[in-house]
Image (cartoon, rainbow, N blue to C red):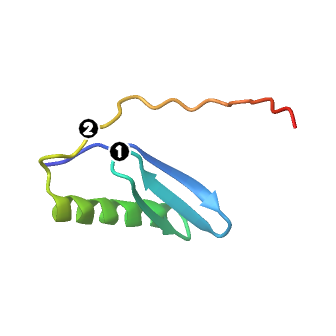
Amino acid sequence: MSFKFTAIITKEKKWYVAHCIELGVVSQGKSIEEAQANLKEAVELYIESFGKDDLPESMGEVLFYPLEVAVNA
């Protein structure tokens, strides 16, 4: 059985940080590929630990767009 989730990777200093949005699982790596592999393993362990019955489904299509906000200081 396989599941589809949404993952986002950001770079924070020397590390790439990978987040699984639906589950709140986070991992990291020194490269994008390492962060992806570590997140996949962390999500698999999460599912094994907490079970498959109450997992949220994927959020569907994810859109990224530039967001500009004016702040009066």
SS at badge 1:
loop
| Residue under the point 39% across and 61% down | 39
Disc 2 to disc 1, how far (Cα)?
Answer: 7 Å
- For label 2, count other residues whose C-alpha is less than 10 Å away and answer few (under 14), some (14-19) or many (20+): few
| Residue under the point 17% across and 46% down | 54
- For label 1, count other residues whose C-alpha is less than 10 Å away and answer few (under 14), some (14-19) or many (20+): some
Q: Which quadrant of the structure image shows residue 5?
A: top left
Q: Are marks 2 and 1 in contact (CB under 8 Å)?
A: yes
User: Quadrant of the image for the C terminus?
Assistant: top right
* Residue 57: percent from left, percent from top: 26, 38
The disc label shown at residue 70, or none: none
> What amino acid type should be assigned to the residue bearing mark 1?
Glu
Q: Report which residue position mark 2 lands on.
A: 57
> What amino acid type should be assigned to the residue bearing mark 2?
Glu
* Residue 50: percent from left, percent from top: 18, 60
Q: Report which residue position mark 1 lands on.
A: 22
Q: Is residue 5 above or below residue 59?
A: below
Q: Is residue 58 left or right of residue 64?
A: left
* Residue 2: percent from left, percent from top: 19, 48
SS at badge 2:
loop
Q: Which quadrant of the structure image shows residue 26?
A: bottom left
